Image (cartoon, grey):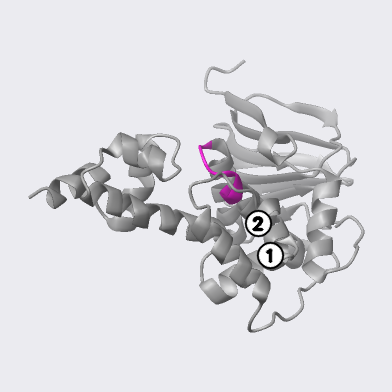
Amino acid sequence: MDTRERTKFWQDPMLSNLELLHATYVTHTFAPHTHEAYVIGVVERGAEQFGYRHRHHIAPVGSIVLINPGEMHTGSSATKDGWTYRALYPSPELLQRAASEIVGKPRDFPFFGEAVIDDPELMAEIALTHRILEEQASSLERESRLLWMLARLIVRHADDHPQPGPLPKEHQGLKRARAFLDEHYTENISLEQLAMVAQLSPFHLLRLFREQVHLPPHAYQLQLRIQRAKELLRSGMSGVDTALAVGFADQSHLTKHFKRIVGVPPGQYYKLQQK
């Protein structure tokens, strides 16, 4: 094995054991093989070449690779320096469910006719979703990002391009979901749980939040946590205790999100309040 090669392969138990891969390959060559799941990959560096559906494909840096379940394919580097790759392997049932939620009625499994796609915006979203699933994040964020990304992929690149219908201006379900988050913001709420409170499909709930609150539900929950953290820090509570009190796993998790939203780390914010 080339010492430049690195692989990380894992399953996410929060997402029905979704399999994920983050790897750099230089000399490694994949033998012809199939997957029971879809392959959704993004090339972050270099270029990959592969045989698929009786054609030779090259996926350069910045491209998306899509392989349908059960389809034979290969894989190797298209450059002497290899390629770095992030891939998700969602089950056919997961994409069928996403496609059904988009249109609000049962759909067949999506089919992707193009194996290599140039879509920089979606490529960035797939890569970000993959990084979030590699890091520490709430169930609500993990489920929301994955479903939203899969839905956008299906709408933009599945052969039949299913389109979501119009949304109502007001919806009691959205109000119920917001009230539930307001009351339970410290808890590790799942998207399924929140959708049941709203009596909406998870995808419909995500659309309503984004269009009417201008934030996805996980970002709304994060705002609530940071607002409460500021109150507790002003009262003199330590960063460690504040992090646990508002629902973060630890102080570093609080610090990461606090600085991104407030502009300074919680320790500095705390010192300013004590003057």
Badge 2 marks a residue whose secondary structure is helix
Determine which quarter of the picture holds residue 154: bottom right
Tell me, yes or no, whether the two marked residues, 1 and 2, touch with CB atoms within 8 Å.
Answer: yes
Q: Is residue 260 left or right of residue 274?
A: right
Q: Residues within 10 Å of mark 1 (few under 14, many from 20)?
A: many
Give amino acid for label 2. Leu
Residue 40 or 200: which is nearer the viewer?
200
Which residue was labeled with disc 1?
Answer: 198
Q: Residue furthest left?
A: 275
State the image coordinates of residue 129 (x, y, percent, origin top left).
58, 48
Between 265 and 191, the one nearer to me in the picture: 191
Q: Check disc 1 and report its element: helix, strand or loop.
A: helix
Residue placed at 85% from the left, 47% from the top? 92
- Residue displayed at 67% across by 66% down: 205
Provide residue 61's location: percent of width, then percent of height.
57, 48
Residue depicted at x 69% and y 82%: 168
Determine the residue positioned at 70% across, 79% down: 167
- Residues packed near mark 2 inside 10 Å, few (<14), some (14 to 19) or many (20 plus): many
Residue 36 badge? none
Q: Tell me which segment is drawn in magenta.
A: 135-141
Q: Nearer the viewer, residue 227 or 125?
A: 227
Say which of 159 and 164 sits in front. 164
Residue 198 in percent (x, y) is at: 68, 65
Res. 249 in view: yes
Query: In the image, is 215 to the left or to the right of 274?
Result: right
Which residue position is annotated with label 2? 194
For the N terminus, the quadrant is top right
Residue 135: x %, y % from top left: 51, 37
The part of the image, by quadrant, that contains residue 165 is bottom right
